[in-house]
Image (cartoon, rainbow, N blue to C red):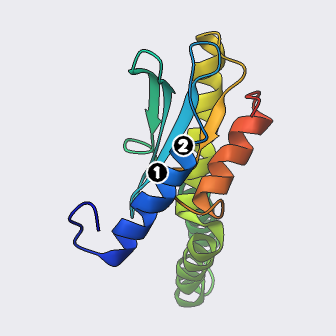
């Protein structure tokens, strides 16, 4: 190993990322979209490699997942419905908990956050005048959250 890594997985990702970076280069006209994925969050940057500057940065740090918002709204509606009816309060009290549990497990909170980051990235990039970009997946497989971010950015107007 060229660098000291605590985990073999980190070393493998670093090698894949190095391989990707040999091919993908960002310019002033077509900056590179660099993706970093942690356990809880996802980050994306627009980078101009010619000058070594970060032009734009977006992350999921201060966001709340759209799936989580929907689950909360459903739980509130179910509680209001249960409070509105007088008969069978004990049976009605169990339903919001079940609905809340089901909605959270189906949603995919991290993937929804990645889609939101992709949308924000596309909107911010277009506001700064960037339409075409080069996508750098950062050594991660083009799957799951990374693919969701890329697809969402494409849907909202970025070309790569």
What residue is shown at x 65% (from left), y 59% (from top)?
Answer: 142
What residue is shown at x 28% (from left), y 61% (from top)?
Answer: 2
Residue 108 visible, this orientation: yes
Q: Residues within 10 Å of mark 1 (few under 14, many from 20)?
A: some
Q: Is residue 20 above or below residue 107?
A: above
Image position, residue 102 (x, y; %): 62, 78
**As drawn, is 135 to the left or to the right of 110?**
right
What residue is shown at x 57% (from left), y 19% (from top)?
Answer: 27
Quarter of the image where one finds residue 118: top right
Q: Residues within 10 Å of mark 2 (few under 14, many from 20)?
A: few
The residue pinned by badge 1 equals 18
What residue is shown at x 56% (from left), y 34% (from top)?
Answer: 33
Q: Is residue 158 above or below residue 76?
A: above
The residue pinned by badge 2 equals 22
Q: Secondary structure at mark 2?
A: loop
Image position, residue 120 (x, y; %): 58, 31
Which residue occupies the foreground of this view, 116 or 100?
Answer: 116
Image position, residue 100 (x, y; %): 56, 73
Q: Secondary structure at mark 1?
A: helix
- Is there a contact, CB below 8 Å, between mark 2 and mark 1? yes
**As drawn, is 61 to the left or to the right of 158?**
left
Residue 66 visible, this orientation: no
Which residue occupies the foreground of this view, 12 or 96?
Answer: 12
**As drawn, is 152 to the left or to the right of 41?**
right
Quarter placement of the C terminus: top right
Q: Is residue 56 above or below residue 29?
A: below
Which residue occupies the foreground of this view, 92 or 13?
Answer: 13
Image position, residue 58 (x, y; %): 46, 33
């Amino acid at each position: 190993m060229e660098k000291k890594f605590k985990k073999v997985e980190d070393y493998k990702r670093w090698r894949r990322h190095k391989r990707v970076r040999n091919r993908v280069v960002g310019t002033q006209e077509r900056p590179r979209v660099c993706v970093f994925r942690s356990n809880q969050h996802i980050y994306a940057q627009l980078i101009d490699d010619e000058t070594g500057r970060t032009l734009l940065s977006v992350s999921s740090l201060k966001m709340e997942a759209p799936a989580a918002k929907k689950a909360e709204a459903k739980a509130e509606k179910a509680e209001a419905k249960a409070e509105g009816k007088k008969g069978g309060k004990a049976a009605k009290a169990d339903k919001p908990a079940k609905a809340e549990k089901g909605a959270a497990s189906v949603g995919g909170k991290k993937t929804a956050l990645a889609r939101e980051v992709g949308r924000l990235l596309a909107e911010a990039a277009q506001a700064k005048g960037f339409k075409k970009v080069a996508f750098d997946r950062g050594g991660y497989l083009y799957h799951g959250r990374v693919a969701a971010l890329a697809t969402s950015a494409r849907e909202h107007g970025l070309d790569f």
